[in-house]
């Protein structure tokens, strides 16, 4: 027996709908629709075009129905922290503001919150966004995947893996941290009740006009939560790098690490599927390279990487966790300035900028893997790189060299695969814990292993 499932995967630069056929010994994934996610700046504020994204979702579901003839489930994941505000009747009050907008630039870390939420300070965390618009008329808030699910089913809720990124969830109890919300003047009743991955949200309403009656399941709606499900690891002694616009680097644990050392090291404790904890550090990721390509007018990524391979290793390095690189625009200049301040050669060519970024990412991955082991007590003997960065051969080899560990690259579509695996299990098509889901990945996917070069 197999089932047909649609994964709606919304990324920072594009969205897509993937169609999967899943069975006990089968896992086939096909992209049926891709659409641009292009933020819009209006009167100095950077917004997401949420209605354009929703139309892209509907077009993708229509394409999935046309390709498969039926769907046994739909799951939705996206980036974290951003949300839509609704009025008392459930109507959207305005386009969600982009996390790269500058409205939270003056946010200040409240150190005592970490012992409750386990969430590392980032100026764009949901809690600080809500503080920035405290005068809003919003009566409720839905995170991006929950907002799309609400429009499809009419049923509000807050999926827990994404809820944990808000800075408003208690890391131990996995309930809303009312004391934290009240301390900053945020109404703890803004968010709908929590959902667990695998719960049935509801069925698509007839008025949506496509896929009527198809079940919509909660999945790991934070895309990294789904991506970690899609890590084809064997055993627990692994680290992961979910490598895309952002890089999320860490280990999977049974419980949170809420020590002061973890806070100072910039580690965050986000909920994973099946009650796990994603103990990780945020690294800027391939955003740095994407912005350099855009600014320098470079479309040929394979050609750029081939040239970068010939640039001397670690000639110029930056701190790939530095918030100075968060905002869009002027990336090559900011990278050059950081190198100059560090007394290093400034990159001058596109290949030098690319090599600087990739070397810096590999070093940041190494540091995060080593710190995750030290802080959590979890030993690591392999690093799994999943997401779009797993296709970047130079980055994967540099990561193996930096970490001194084998790097297993793939799948590139880990997020969509994790999404559909949770759906298929909820629908009864497959069964088992995370280890069994990952076993299915290993038996159906082609992976590549990179080994560290001898110094």
Image (cartoon, helix red, strand yellow):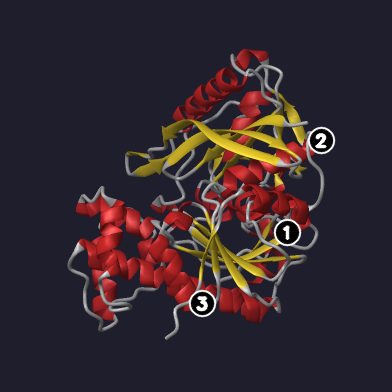
Label tally: 3
**441 horizontally vs 30: left or right:** right
- Pick whichever of labels 3 and 2 is earlier in the sequence: 3
Judged from the image, the secondary structure of the residue bearing numbered disc 3 is helix
Q: CA distance from mark 3 to mark 2?
A: 39 Å
Q: Residues within 10 Å of mark 1 (few under 14, many from 20)?
A: some
Q: Which residue is mark 3?
A: 403
Q: Which residue is mark 2?
A: 428
**235 horizontally vs 127: left or right:** right
Judged from the image, the secondary structure of the residue bearing numbered disc 2 is loop
Image quadrant occupied by the N terminus: top right
- Pick whichever of labels 1 and 3 is earlier in the sequence: 1
Of 442 and 151, the residue lying toward us: 442
**416 horizontally vs 299: left or right:** right
- Pick whichever of labels 2 and 1 is earlier in the sequence: 1
Q: Position of residue 115 (x, y in %)?
A: 70, 70
Query: Residue at horizontal 26%, vertical 50%?
Result: 300
Q: Is residue 276 visible?
A: yes
Q: Which residue is mark 1?
A: 179
Q: CA distance from mark 1 to mark 3?
A: 40 Å
């Amino acid at each position: 027996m197999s089932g047909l499932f649609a994964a709606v995967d919304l990324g920072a630069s594009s969205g897509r709908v993937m169609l999967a056929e899943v069975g006990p010994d089968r896992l086939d994934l096909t992209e049926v629709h891709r659409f641009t996610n292009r933020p819009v700046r209006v009167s100095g504020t950077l917004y997401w075009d949420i209605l354009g994204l929703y139309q892209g979702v509907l077009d993708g579901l229509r394409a999935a129905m046309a390709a498969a003839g039926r769907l046994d489930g739909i799951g939705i994941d996206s980036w974290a922290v951003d949300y839509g505000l609704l009025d008392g009747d459930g109507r959207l009050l305005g386009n969600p503001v982009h996390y790269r907008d500058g409205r939270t630039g003056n946010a200040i870390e409240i150190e005592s919150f970490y012992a409750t939420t386990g969430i590392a300070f980032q100026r764009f965390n949901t809690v600080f966004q809500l503080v920035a618009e405290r005068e809003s008329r919003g009566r409720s808030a839905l995170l991006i995947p929950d907002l799309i699910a609400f429009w499809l089913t009419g049923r509000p809720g807050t999926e827990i893996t994404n809820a944990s990124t808000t800075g408003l969830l208690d890391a131990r109890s996995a309930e809303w941290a009312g004391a934290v919300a009240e301390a900053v003047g945020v109404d703890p009743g803004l968010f709908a009740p929590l959902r667990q991955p695998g719960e049935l949200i509801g069925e698509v309403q007839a008025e949506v006009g496509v896929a009527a009656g198809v079940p919509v399941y909660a999945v790991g709606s934070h895309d990294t939560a789904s991506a970690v499900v899609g890590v084809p690891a064997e055993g627990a002694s692994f680290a992961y790098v979910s490598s895309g616009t952002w890089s999320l680097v860490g280990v999977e644990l049974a419980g949170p690490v809420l020590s002061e050392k973890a806070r100072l090291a910039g580690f965050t404790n986000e909920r994973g599927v099946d009650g796990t904890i994603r103990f990780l550090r945020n690294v800027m990721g391939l955003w740095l390279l994407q912005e350099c390509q855009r600014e320098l007018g470079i479309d040929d990524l394979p050609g750029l990487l081939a040239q970068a391979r010939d640039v001397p290793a670690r000639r110029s390095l930056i701190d790939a966790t530095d918030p100075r690189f968060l905002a869009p625009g002027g990336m090559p200049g900011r990278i050059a300035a950081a190198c100059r301040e560090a007394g290093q050669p400034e990159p001058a060519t596109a290949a030098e900028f690319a090599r600087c970024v990739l070397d810096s990412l590999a070093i940041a991955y190494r540091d995060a893997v080593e710190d995750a082991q030290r802080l959590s007590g979890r030993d690591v003997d392999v690093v799994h790189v999943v997401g779009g960065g797993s296709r970047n051969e130079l980055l994967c080899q540099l990561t193996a060299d930096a970490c001194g560990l084998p790097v297993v690259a793939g799948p590139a579509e880990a997020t969509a695969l994790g999404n559909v695996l949770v759906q298929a299990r909820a629908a009864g098509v497959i069964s088992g814990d995370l280890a069994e889901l990952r076993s299915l990945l290993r038996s159906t996917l082609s992976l590549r292993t990179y080994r560290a070069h001898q110094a």
